[in-house]
Image: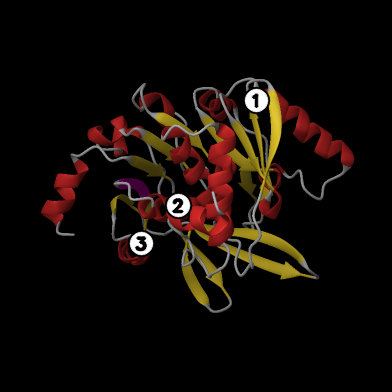
Amino acid sequence: MTSSSAQHFAHATPDALIIGHVTRDLTPNGWRLGGAAYYAARAASLRGLSVAALTSADGEVAAAARAALPGVTLRIVPADVSTTFENVYHDGARTQFLRAVASPLRAQDIPAAWLAAPVALLAPVAGEVDPDIVAALSPVTRVGLAPQGWLRAWDASGAVQPVPLEPAGREALSHCQAVILSRDDLGGNGASPAARQRVDTMLGDWAGDVACLVITRGWEGAEVWHDSRRSLVPGFPAREVDPTGAGDVFAVTFLCALADGSTPEGAAREANAVAACSVEGEGASAIPTPAAARGRFGL
């Protein structure tokens, strides 16, 4: 896309707006693109939507993102470094390290026309998304939040650990139409019974503040909390190759399906199907169109 074309599209309102860092994910074989915003933007584009994304990265990662997301209009806040993650395994246990963080993302970084997008997904991975963005979006925007990046802290070594949601994030949460996360984001899987109970209590509290709360559960499917009830929407079988990004694919698919008129349970079924297909290849390579996922599973 030429600079003049990019400027034109920055003045057009997209069907879907994605906000968060694309990341440099370090692997034993080098680095690859990652981040919730990357996976979500790819999935929304495959839905046939016009998609815009606000992110921040250094030149190398920015160029890679433009190449990998040819149908997505990117606004990239300049940064000396890109947000960089590395997973280190020892005796079967994983420790995630945050090696660098790009620039923060604020409401003033968003082109005015983008603020009226019918659908917006906030997808922070390292606390980079300003919660005030929620208030800046149009009142008619269906706002979804995948808050994993607001639930992370890291020490001097970069080791990541879960932390409670700060007050500004909690306030933003109450203005979202859908909040999508996993118990892993809260440190609730593999924890003590008391810790798991605390997580369930917190989620029940959150469910009273948001129209729809969804807890992804991998191959099992997803819990959907809305209208004072909680239901499990089963997942679909898949040959897992790489689960990275499946939750992000689920989040944007769920939000877009809601905007298209699906019930929360129906949106979760579609999101489960798309996410199941997405784990069958490396990175974002296996993300399907919703039509392909629905056809595969007979939806």
Q: Secondary structure at mark 2?
A: helix
Q: Is residue 264 above or below residue 192?
A: above
Q: Which residue is mark 3?
A: 65
50 w.r.t. 171: above or below: below
Spatial CA distance of label 3 from label 1 is 35 Å
Count of numbered badges drawn on the protein: 3
**Secondary element at tag 1:** helix
Q: Inspect the image, locate mark 2, and give the three-letter code of the amino acid beneath it.
A: Pro
Residues in magenta?
51-55
Kindly identify which residue carries mark 2. Answer: 290
Q: Main secondary structure of the magenta part?
A: strand
Amino acid at dot 3 = Ala
Q: Which mark is residue 207?
A: 1
CB-based contact (under 8 Å), mark 3 and mark 2: no
Residue at the bottom extreme, as displayed: 29
Residue 85 lies, in percent from the top left, at 55, 61
Q: Residue at x 36, y 52 (%)?
A: 45
Q: Of the residues tagged 2 and 1, which is closer to the observer?
A: 2
**Dot in front, 3 or 2:** 2
In magenta segment, residue 84: no
The vertical placement of 213 against 74, above or below, is above
Image quadrant holding the N terminus, namely: bottom left
Q: Position of residue 192 (x, y in %)?
A: 87, 44
Q: Nearer the viewer, residue 209 or 294?
A: 294
Label 2 CA crowd tier, 10 Å (few <14, some 14–19, many 20+): many
Q: Earlier in the sequence, mark 3 or mark 2?
A: 3
Whole-percent x, y for residue 252 in the image: 47, 44
Q: Residue at x 61, y 61 (%)?
A: 243
